[in-house]
Image (cartoon, grey):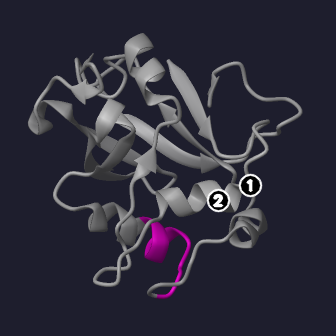
Amino acid sequence: MRFELTNCLSNGTELFDLTTTVLWRNYKNPYEVYIPLPNSKKFHTKYPDFFVKNGGLLRGNKLVSDRPNRSFELELLPSEEKMTMFINQDNGKGIQSLSSQFIFGEWVLKNIFQLKDRELLTTDTLEDVGINAITFTKYDDNRPVSMNFTYVDSENPPEDLWN
C-alpha cells in the first residue's frame, strides 16, 4: 500500500503557504516541525492502520489510542535513517517525532535542506531541488513505513495521491 501527500496540486494554494504551516518555528527553538496529513479525518477513517495498528482511530476529532499506541518507526529515504514518530493533534492531522518535534525538525532542516538556524524553507529552495510532495510507503512485511521527499507532476498525478 502506498499513498502520496502533496502540497501543490489543484487547490491553488502556493507551496510556500502550506510549507509555513508545516514548518512553524518559535523563538526558542528553530526546529519545531511536524508533517501535516491533508484531509486527515477522511484519511484515518479510510486507513486507520496505515502508520500503526489502530493509530488513526478517531472518536469525534480526538485520537482514541494513547501516544505509545500511535507511535511507529519511520524510515527516512534515501538515507535509511530511522526515527520514532507518532500521530498527533485533532483528527490526527500531524505526524511528529516522538520525544520532541525538534528531532525530526532538525533532521529535515539541517541535514536534508542544510538550512541555517531560523532560515526559512522557501518555495525557491524546494523548486531548486525538485520537491513538492512527500511519499509514505507501507509495506506488507515488517519493514517500517518509509518517507521520501519527491516531485509530483500536477498534470499526471499518481493514482494513490492523497491531498
x and y, in percent, of residue 143 in the image = 33, 30
Q: What's under tag 1, amino acid-wise?
A: Glu
Q: Which mark is residue 17?
A: 2
Secondary structure state at the residue bearing disc 1: loop
Reply above or below: 40 against 106: above
**Bounds of the magenta span?**
108-116
Residue shown at 35% from the left, 76% from the top: 26
Q: Nearer the viewer, residue 75 or 105?
A: 105
x and y, in percent, of residue 29 in the image = 31, 80
Check contact, mark 2 vs mark 1: CB within 8 A.
yes
Q: Which mark is residue 116?
A: none
Q: Nearer the viewer, residue 106 or 62?
A: 62
Q: Nearer the viewer, residue 138 or 13?
A: 13
Q: Which residue is outermost to the top? A: 46
Reply above or below: 77 against 135: below
Report the side of 68 relative to 76 (left or right): left
Residue shown at 46% from the left, 57% from the top: 79
* Residue 112, magenta (yes or no): yes
x and y, in percent, of residue 63 in the image = 22, 27
Report the side of 104 relative to 71 (left or right): right
Reply above or below: 158 against 107: above
Q: Which residue is mark 1?
A: 14
* Residue 152, magenta (yes or no): no
Report the side of 154 relative to 23 (left or right): right
Secondary structure state at the residue bearing disc 2: helix
Quarter of image, res 11? top right
Mark 2 burial class by Cα count in 10 Å: few <14, some 14-19, many 20+: few
